[in-house]
Amino acid sequence: MKDQSVFELIHTMEKVTNRLIIQWNQSFNENLGITHILLLGQLKNNGKCRPIDLANYLGIAPSSITHLTDKLLSRKLIIRIADENDKRISYVAITENGLEILQKAQEEGYLLQMRTFEKLSAEERHQLLTIYNKLNNLLEKS
């Protein structure tokens, strides 16, 4: 594969992703970004987490997690919980309000997904999913 083709492929994938994010942001009027929603989803799925674990999951710097969690804390979408054995350690957990916002975000995401991917045939959707899963698996192993 030519180098230019690799960069064209990455650029095209980024353009699709960016356009999806922009459309989702326009329909989800909660002043929260995708990363906030991913963080809430991680807390819902895994329970309370240390901020450093969230940063690792999201692939962001630990200093960036503070900005994200501060916004969610101020909106009462998450709470901070001190460790019972070591008060230096704290966790964050999703609240009922956070669950409601996450549900709303997922509904908006589903509508966007339907509007976008319904234009592809079932076979094309299957191929796309297969390709992305294969790429994710390969990149995780490298």
Image (spheres, grey):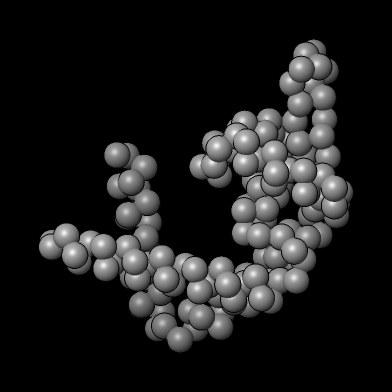
The reply to whether residue 103 is in sight is: no
Above or below 123: residue 38? above
Picture coordinates of residue 62, whole percent (x, y)? 60, 34
- In the displayed orientation, state which residue is furthest to the bottom: 119
Question: In the figure, residue 37 lies in which quadrant?
Answer: bottom right
- In the displayed orientation, state which residue is furthest to the left: 2
Nearest the eye: 113 or 56? 56
Quarter of the picture holding the N terminus = bottom left
Residue drawn at point x = 55 percent, y = 37 percent: 61
Callout count: 0
The reply to whether residue 36 is in sight is: yes
Residue drawn at point x = 76 percent, y = 17 percent: 88
Residue drawn at point x = 71 percent, y = 71 percent: 28
Picture coordinates of residue 119, whole percent (x, y)? 45, 86
On screen, residue 24 versus residue 15, left or right, reads: right
On screen, residue 19 versus residue 42, left or right, reads: left
Question: In the figure, residue 92 lies in which quadrant?
Answer: top right
Picture coordinates of residue 103, whole percent (x, y)? 74, 62
Residue drawn at point x = 66 percent, y = 76 percent: 26
Nearest the eye: 5 or 116? 5
Quarter of the picture holding the C terminus = top left
Above or below 126: residue 66? above
Nearest the eye: 139 or 45? 139
Question: In the figure, residue 5 lies in which quadrant?
Answer: bottom left
Picture coordinates of residue 50, whole percent (x, y)? 68, 30
- In the displayed orientation, state which residue is furthest to the top: 85
Above or below 120: residue 130? above
